[in-house]
């Protein structure tokens, strides 16, 4: 796979308040005054969406998993690579909802059972101009623009710190200074974890930078942070062969190139975000905690999962707070609950350390401590899952 700078397509910021345009029978069901709701059935070899056409504005996807493994659903841009909206970690028998604000245009839908590989059932999906959209007031438009501008600035800042931090880490790694490299590994990765869902929106960049060994499709080369993690914390069992100095240099060079590609992508003058992308990103970052960090599956050799947890939590909170004022206008009770749950989970996690002092290794946590952290994540995840629907209401 090759890196390239690609940007999220610009689109309508506000969802339509009411969509009354009469469309053909293949268009999503859309009662007057409501958002169209489509069903998605993710099977072992297909991704069945109930309609191939929808009106522009807010579109809701109810995703059901009919397989025996966790799945993902993606809405891709017209190039079939860029991620416009996604929902991950859809467990068998546990439907989840994705809410997105969509501009007119051509897209693709695809599911990814097992959350690995290129996905199945990739199908063209068309969004037709509804011809009926709400116009924000001057104050609302200013809030929306500020939310988008501030979040883009935050993403650029994190990636701007990631680039030199990665180089410092790689310099130590290539030089064989494993002690320094191990110390830098979780701290530098924090910049990536805060904007992980942004990296995922750029096609192949996240797989190249951050795939775990188990995520790599058969036949693809495993590269990125976790390839080096395994070499720095080699498995105790016999059989692992340490990378040679030349191999270390080669993998380090690939990580440098891919990190620069991420920098170039978010600094493209056309790079922007919609407010629903910001809120969906907050939801997805907490999903990352639930699916990998709280289970100890993300950093299986270094056991630095709680550092990643902290990065995801910080990134989710920044995304949420960027749209908080807009959400509060629609549902002040939801905002109060989210403020409280974010504070509670951060306080709970802080008991295990910080980036400055280091975090307790995951393999040192008791089962009771893991359960308590998982309960804290779930307590935040429930109200956070309503963020996008409330935001674009």
Image: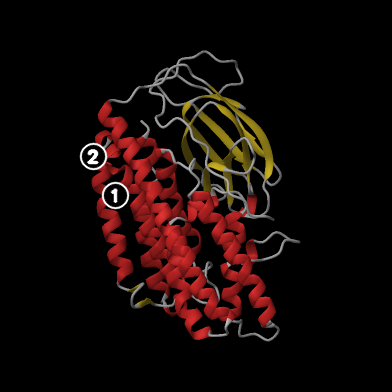
- Viewer can see residue 202: yes
Determine whether the residue tagged by mark 1 lies in a helix, strand or loop: helix
Q: Is residue 190 left or right of residue 67?
A: left
Q: Position of residue 37 (x, y in %)?
A: 50, 29
Q: Residue furthest top?
A: 22
Disc number placed over residue 321 in the picture, else none: none
Q: Are marks 2 and 1 in contact (CB under 8 Å)?
A: no
Determine whether the residue tagged by mark 2 lies in a helix, strand or loop: helix
Q: Residues within 10 Å of mark 1 (few under 14, many from 20)?
A: many
Q: To which quarter of the image does residue 123 belong?
A: top right
Q: Residue furthest right?
A: 219
Q: Is residue 221 positioned above or below 265 on the image?
A: below
Colouring used for the render: secondary structure
Q: Is residue 358 positioned above or below 86 on the image?
A: below
Q: Position of residue 296 (x, y in %)?
A: 50, 69
Q: Is residue 370 left or right of residue 53?
A: left
Q: Position of residue 28 (x, y in %)?
A: 55, 24
Q: Residues within 10 Å of mark 2 (few under 14, many from 20)?
A: some
| First reached walking from the N terminus: tag 2 or tag 1 | 2
Q: To which quarter of the image does residue 375 belong?
A: bottom left
Q: Is residue 13 positioned above or below 373 on the image?
A: above
Q: Is residue 79 left or right of residue 94?
A: right
Distance CA(mark 2)–CA(mark 1): 10 Å
Residue pointed to by mark 1: 338
Q: Look at 54% across and 77% down and name the residue there.
A: 171
- Viewer can see residue 243: no
Q: Look at 30% across and 48% down and name the residue there.
A: 321
Q: Quadrant of the N terminus?
A: bottom right
Residue pointed to by mark 2: 332
Q: To which quarter of the image does residue 357 belong?
A: bottom left
């Amino acid at each position: 796979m090759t890196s390239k700078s690609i940007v999220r397509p610009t689109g309508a910021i506000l969802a339509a308040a009411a969509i009354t345009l009469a469309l053909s029978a293949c268009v999503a069901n859309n009662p007057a005054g409501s958002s169209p709701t489509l069903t998605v059935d993710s099977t072992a070899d297909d991704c069945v969406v109930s309609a191939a056409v929808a009106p522009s504005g807010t579109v809701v996807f109810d995703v059901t998993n009919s397989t025996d493994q966790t799945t993902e659903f993606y809405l891709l841009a017209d190039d079939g690579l860029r991620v416009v909206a996604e929902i991950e970690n859809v467990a068998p028998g546990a439907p989840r909802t994705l809410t997105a604000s969509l501009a007119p245009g051509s897209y693709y839908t695809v599911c990814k059972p097992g959350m690995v590989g290129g996905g199945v059932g990739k199908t063209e999906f068309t969004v037709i101009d509804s011809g009926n959209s709400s116009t924000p007031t001057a104050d609302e438009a200013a809030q929306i623009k500020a939310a988008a501008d501030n979040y883009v600035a935050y993403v650029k800042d994190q990636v701007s710190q990631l680039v030199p931090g990665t180089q410092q880490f790689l310099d130590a790694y290539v030089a064989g200074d494993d002690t320094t490299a191990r110390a830098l590994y979780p701290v530098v990765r924090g910049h990536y974890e805060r904007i992980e869902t942004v990296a995922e929106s750029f096609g192949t960049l996240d797989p190249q930078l951050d795939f775990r060994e188990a995520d790599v499709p058969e036949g693809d080369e495993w590269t990125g942070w976790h390839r080096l993690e395994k070499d720095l914390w080699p498995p105790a069992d016999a059989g692992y062969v340490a990378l040679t100095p030349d191999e270390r240099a080669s993998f380090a060079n690939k990580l440098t190139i891919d990190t620069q590609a991420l920098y170039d992508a978010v600094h493209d003058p056309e790079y922007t975000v919609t407010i629903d992308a910001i809120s969906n990103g907050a939801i997805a970052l907490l999903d990352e905690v639930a699916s990998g960090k709280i289970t100890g599956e993300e950093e299986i050799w270094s056991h630095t999962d709680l550092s990643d947890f902290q990065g995801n939590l910080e990134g989710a909170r920044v995304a949420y707070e960027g749209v908080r004022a807009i959400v509060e206008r629609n549902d002040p009770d939801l905002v109060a609950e989210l403020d409280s749950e974010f504070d509670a989970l951060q306080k709970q996690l802080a008991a295990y350390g910080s980036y400055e002092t280091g975090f307790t290794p995951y393999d040192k946590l008791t089962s009771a401590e893991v359960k308590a952290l998982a309960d804290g994540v779930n307590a935040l995840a429930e109200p956070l899952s309503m963020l996008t629907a409330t935001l674009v209401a």
